[in-house]
Image (spheres, helix red, strand yellow):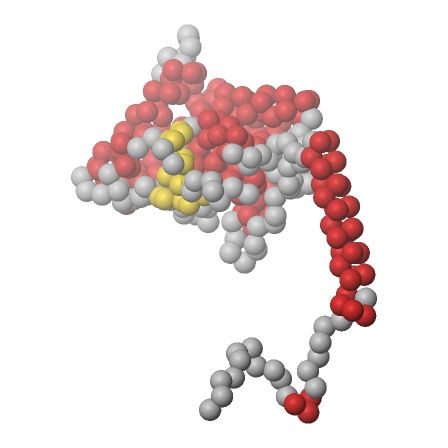
């Protein structure tokens, strides 16, 4: 029997199962692949400062980061990508790299660096989900980490300060959203009729931007111009995360090889032969079951003893 899987992640709000991008990616992929995962939010625990989330626990194994967790789930035979062609697999990797390079810095800035959003939305939310005294430490810790990451990846010469890179990161993010919108087109998902790991990544990146009530939202305003991307997020939420809409069964991965198919056919032939022999025996007069005479009633299974 497979070991139970537990996912530690930030909790949900704004109509989302989690407000955390990386947690959303894993939650969505688990739904897409049919993996049964018990969700354990770290909200209001000491793990809000110390834990690296998302973290998947399975037996004695602990896996962190979305790419590693998705690879682990695939090894457990929960694979939402098995129908992809080699070309589609390469496109998936390219678009995920695009999200990390172009959209990630703008999301970090929007939620953690933009003063109006941080003061009125992000800091109060994370402070309210952290126990005292971590409610004073967790928001500032994440804000400093976000700022450092932006400057590390985008602060090349001559851009060294956050005010100098804002224009660049938002321009890149809008270009990324435009490319995703063009790739999605009128389809529900990026590759065919079933969602894949690319859909999980896009959902994790775009859904918080779509659903959060941002006081300052230039990037959110641009996203709302791309109807198909917002519709994509709403579709994933309604189909996979709504209690009123049970999740559709994931596609079954075909792993039966030729030898197993031959063995199955042989077993079926033997079963049919046994059924025919049994029917012949039952139709034979000497093998007809004895039926008790209704006048004498049913014969008791226990032998009667004389008085």
Give the image location of residue 114, x and y in percent. 37, 31
> In the visual, does 124 lie left or right of 27?
left
Q: Is residue 46 above or below residue 295?
A: above
Residue 212 seen from this side:
no
Nearer the observer, 25 or 150: 25
Q: Is residue 163 above or below residue 139?
A: above
Give the image location of residue 144, x and y in percent. 30, 25
Image point (49%, 88%), residue name: 306
Give the image location of residue 72, x and y in percent. 48, 30
Image point (71%, 31%), residue name: 259
The single residue placed furthest to the left in the displayed view is: 133
Residue 144 seen from this side:
yes
> In the visual, does 181 lie left or right of 101?
right
Image point (56%, 54%), residue name: 246
Give the image location of residue 50, x and y in percent. 27, 32
Nearer the observer, 216 or 281: 281
């Amino acid at each position: 029997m497979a070991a139970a899987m537990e996912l530690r992640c930030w909790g949900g709000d704004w109509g989302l199962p989690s407000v955390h991008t990386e947690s959303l990616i894993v939650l969505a992929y688990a739904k897409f692949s049919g993996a049964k995962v018990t969700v354990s939010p770290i909200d209001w625990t000491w793990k809000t400062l110390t834990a690296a989330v998302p973290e998947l626990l399975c037996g004695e194994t602990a896996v962190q980061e979305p790419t590693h967790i998705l690879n682990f789930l695939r090894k457990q035979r929960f694979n939402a990508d098995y129908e992809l062609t080699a070309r589609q697999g390469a496109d998936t990797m390219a678009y995920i790299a695009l999200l990390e390079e172009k959209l990630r810095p703008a999301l970090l800035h929007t939620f953690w660096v933009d003063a109006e959003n941080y003061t009125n939305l992000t800091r109060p939310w994370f402070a309210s989900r952290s126990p005292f005294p971590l409610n004073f430490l967790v928001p500032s810790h994440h804000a400093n980490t976000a700022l450092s990451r932006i400057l590390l990846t985008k602060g090349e010469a001559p851009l060294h300060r956050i005010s100098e890179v804002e224009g660049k990161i938002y321009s890149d993010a809008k270009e990324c959203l435009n490319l995703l919108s063009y790739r999605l087109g009128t389809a529900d998902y990026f590759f065919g009729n079933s969602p894949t790991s690319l859909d999980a990544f896009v959902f994790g990146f775009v859904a918080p931007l779509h659903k959060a009530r941002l006081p300052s939202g230039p990037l959110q305003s641009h996203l709302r111009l791309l109807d198909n991307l917002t519709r994509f997020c709403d579709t994933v939420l309604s189909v996979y995360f709504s209690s009123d809409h049970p999740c559709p069964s994931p596609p079954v991965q075909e792993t039966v090889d030729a030898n197993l198919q031959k063995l199955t056919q042989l077993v079926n032939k033997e079963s049919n032969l046994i059924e025919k022999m049994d029917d012949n025996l039952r139709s034979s007069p000497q093998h007809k079951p004895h039926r008790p005479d209704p006048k004498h009633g049913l014969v008791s299974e226990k032998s009667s003893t004389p008085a």
